[in-house]
Image (tube, rainbow, N blue to C red):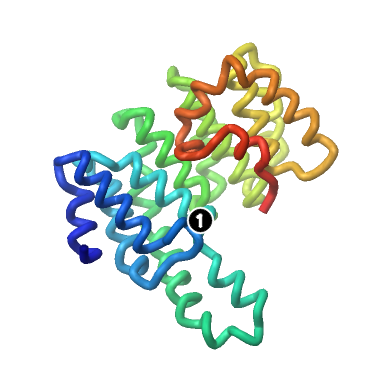
Amino acid sequence: MKIKKLLTRTRGSDRRKALLALSALEERISPQGAAFMEEAVQAIPKLLDTATHSMTPVRVEILRYLADAYEHTLGTWQFRWDDEPAMRHHFAEMVACESSIAQSYRDSIPWVMPLLGPDNSESVRGSAAYLLSRIRESGPELISTLRQMYDEQVGEPMKIDMMDGVAHLSLTLGLGGACDVQWLRAKLHDHSPVIRMGAALSLLAREDGDERDALERIAVDARPEAEGALRQAAWMANKSTDWALERRPR
């Protein structure tokens, strides 16, 4: 099926058909999440736009795919360009495609930001936070927004997404300050095992030193009571808890 037709079906009112179209589209433009294909230059901007429409039945799934793709797929061709100088002539076109895709993500920030608002469902808000927190150009202002959202009367899966977003912006992208790290570390002592596990996993993914053992113990101790809520978080979609425990800085 042509890319254009798959994109149209992701906007359709039939959720089952939209999910099937999205799955087929993902495999066409980023097979097994390994690298973007040239067709992604056309598809990613359309998906970003589709995710902003409230009538889209699979907007949560689209947002989560886009966030996963940004974090784990975008940059593959650039890595190969850097790693294999003798083969650069083979990668030049795809590096240019990645640059175009990255710009599409940056351009989408003003459209996606309103999805953080309280008039959206918690699953949409958490998924939008997951996506935006991966894009450096969202800026340090997003950290304070996520912390404010955490303080709202929202469910614990959404709070997990807020913590991971703050961790990524602060520690992975280096946009936060000491107060943001302190805020995260305070959650390690929360009365809720869900919050303790979410904080521990968010910090564990950015820690490659001696503290990993202590953070892992906190997460493992909380796991029996917290795993159900954890698996509802946007950044955990289609992933296992064991995967989350093994995350390391990239």
Split into 4 quadrants, where in the image is the N terminus? bottom left
- Answer left or right for 166 relative to 54: right
Which residue ends up furthest to the top in the rendered image? 191
Which residue ends up furthest to the right in the rendered image? 210
* Residue 117 found in image quarter: top left
Residue at 54% of width from left, 39% of height from top? Answer: 165
The picture places residue 191, in percent across and down from the top left corner, at 64, 11
- Answer left or right for 39 relative to 18: right
- Answer left or right for 191 relative to 228: right
Q: Which residue is mark 1?
A: 137
Residue at 74% of width from left, 42% of height from top? Answer: 207
Residue at 48% of width from left, 26% of height from top? Answer: 157
The picture places residue 188, in percent across and down from the top left corner, at 69, 23
Q: Secondary structure at mark 1?
A: helix
| 209 versus 149 height, above or below | below
Visible residue check, residue 106: no
